[in-house]
Image (tube, rainbow, N blue to C red):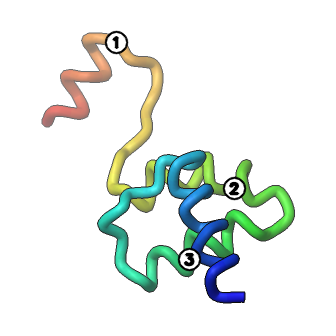
Amino acid sequence: MKLLFNELLEDDKEKFHIPHDSTPFCLKLYQEILQSPNGALVWSFLKPVLHGKILYTPNSPEVNEVIQK
């Protein structure tokens, strides 16, 4: 069972661009999210936040100037 879990996790790492240096806690969190109903959709929204990226729109010079401040 553990081997199967690790194989699924490796497949998920590639498919969902999960960092290979993730901690065991984070790997477990990723796996639980991806195994839940609509997990891939949830992951697409959570990934940038969990990786410390701030999403904003529109990508314009004015907005970029405000973000840089």
Q: Amino acid at mark 1?
A: Ser
What residue appears at the point 69 percent right and 63 percent down from the top-left corner? 34
User: Which circle, 2 or 3, is nearer the viewer?
Assistant: 3
Residue 46 horizontal/vertical position (percent): 56, 56
**Toward the viewer: 25 or 56?**
25
Which disc number belongs to residue 29?
A: 3
- Element at badge 3? helix
What residue appears at the point 36 percent right and 78 percent down from the top-left corner? 23
**Label 1 with label 3: CB-CB less than 8 Å:** no
**Toward the viewer: 33 or 16?**
16
Q: Is residue 14 above or below residue 35?
A: above
Q: Amino acid at mark 2?
A: Val
Q: CA distance from mark 2 to mark 3?
A: 12 Å
Residue 25 horizontal/vertical position (percent): 45, 84
Give the residue at mark 1: 60
Compare marks 1 and 3 and give the one earlier in the sequence.
3
- Choose top left, top right, bottom left or bottom right for residue 19: bottom left
**Toward the viewer: 3 or 30?**
3
> Going by the picture, which residue comes out furthest to the right?
37
- Element at badge 2? helix
Which disc number belongs to residue 39?
A: none
